[in-house]
Image: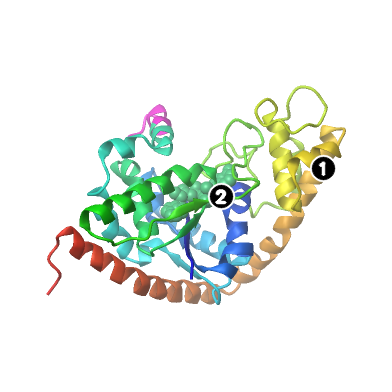
Amino acid sequence: MTRIFSGIKPTGHLTLGNYLGAVRRWVEVDQHRADALFCVVDLHALTVDHDPGRVRRLSRQAATLLLAAGLDPGRCTVFVQSHVDEHARLSYLMECTATDGEMRRMIQYKEKAAREQQRGGSVRLSLLTYPALMAADILAYQADEVPVGDDQTQHVELARDLAVRFNQRYGHAFTVPRAVRPQVAARVMDLQDPASKMGKSHAATAGIVYLLDEPDVIRRKVMRAVTDSGSEVAYEPDTRPGVANLLDILAACTGSSPEELAEGYDSYGALKKDTAEAVVEVLRPLRERHGELCADPGQVDRVLREGAERARALARPTVDAAYSAIGLLPAL
Ligand code: TYM
């Protein structure tokens, strides 16, 4: 059976980009067709300046939202990364497999390191080695497929390279994974700045729709979205990114294509109104279910406990075998 692994980082409240680019597919497709594991990757949240209490709260919130979005613990495994030691154990072997140059070439590293430096902060070493931990997440489970949005495909490519290299040098230890990206909304852009990705860690929040935003807040954010000069609605992502982003969002919410949708509109106002309502409707059940789950925290605890147990049982033999293959003396 196909094995799927994917993760989400608790560095901020989850956004519409996380949902349309990744989580929705996990819920609607992946958990039904494969042995799928979905992980709140809290260790990754420590790679940038962080507040301990906030990371803990956001980890719990992310797990609750994944369940609220429809991940069914009867069908898939939901767990928290730090509950399974194998991630950190294997990450070190990945650091011993990757090169410094490979890590420094990662676009996310360059962007995030530049942002930290601009703010006068220092860059944590773990930000550089982030892709080694991410490769460990994926390879520990022998994952075949990794469903992610566009921004993560370079990291998955590196995980692939590391799997191949490790297997060649030390004998077959890992399945070589591949990234799977959604057809629409693989890169949802910020509503106020359509040149940059809608990201949960951004400081300016007016262009970001959060999964738990109230309907009126969502309407306001979408109605105030930056559009391009001109008034004709056309799908031209390169030259008219603001309108293209709204069309992508509407297409992802309604299951249609952005090009076809563009033909049905003659004003930006009407497009924004329909997009706002479509987003409100897509997120409504999720918000309601989130409220129910918060009222029953024991349920989330149980899911995470059982998820971690299953994840550990799956990862341990692979990581033990990799330790042995690379030349470490097995514990006696
Ligand atoms: P993270 O937490 O930034 O995002 C989680 C998922 O949401 C997707 N995504 C988007 N898709 C479309 N448009 C957007 N604006 C948008 N923003 C985020 C991401 O592509 C991702 O699929 N490094 C990962 C977490 C991770 C991981 C892993 C993923 C750690 N280990 C192993 C897969 C496998 C990250 O920071 O995702």
Residue 181, which numbered label?
Answer: 2
Residue 167: percent from the left, percent from the top?
Answer: 28, 56
Task: Work out whether residue 241 can be spotted.
Answer: yes
Up the image or down, 142 lies above or below 160; here it is below
Q: Which mark is residue 273?
A: 1
Which residue is painted at 55% across and 74% down in the image?
Answer: 75
Given the image, on which type of amino acid does mark 1 rest?
Answer: Lys
**Earlier-in-chain disc, 2 versus 1:** 2
Q: Which span of residues is magenta-colored?
A: 114-123
Frontmost residue, 194 versus 289: 194
Q: Nearer the viewer, mark 2 or mark 1?
A: 2
Query: Where 313 sits versus 128, above or below?
Result: below
Amino acid type, label 2: Arg
Residue depicted at 66% across the width and 36% down the height = 191
Q: Secondary structure at mark 1?
A: helix
Looking at the image, residue 219 lies above or below residue 292:
above
Per the image, is 200 magenta? Answer: no
Real-space CA distance between mark 2 and mark 1, rounded to the nearest whole angstrom: 28 Å
Give residue 125's quadrant in the image.
top left
The picture places residue 216, in percent across and down from the top left corner, at 76, 48
Say if the magenta span includes residue 120.
Answer: yes
Is 8 on the left or on the right of 273, as rendered?
left
- Toward which corner of the image does residue 313 lie, by quadrant? bottom left
- Neighbor class of circle 1 (other Cα within 10 Å; few <14, some 14-19, many 20+) is some
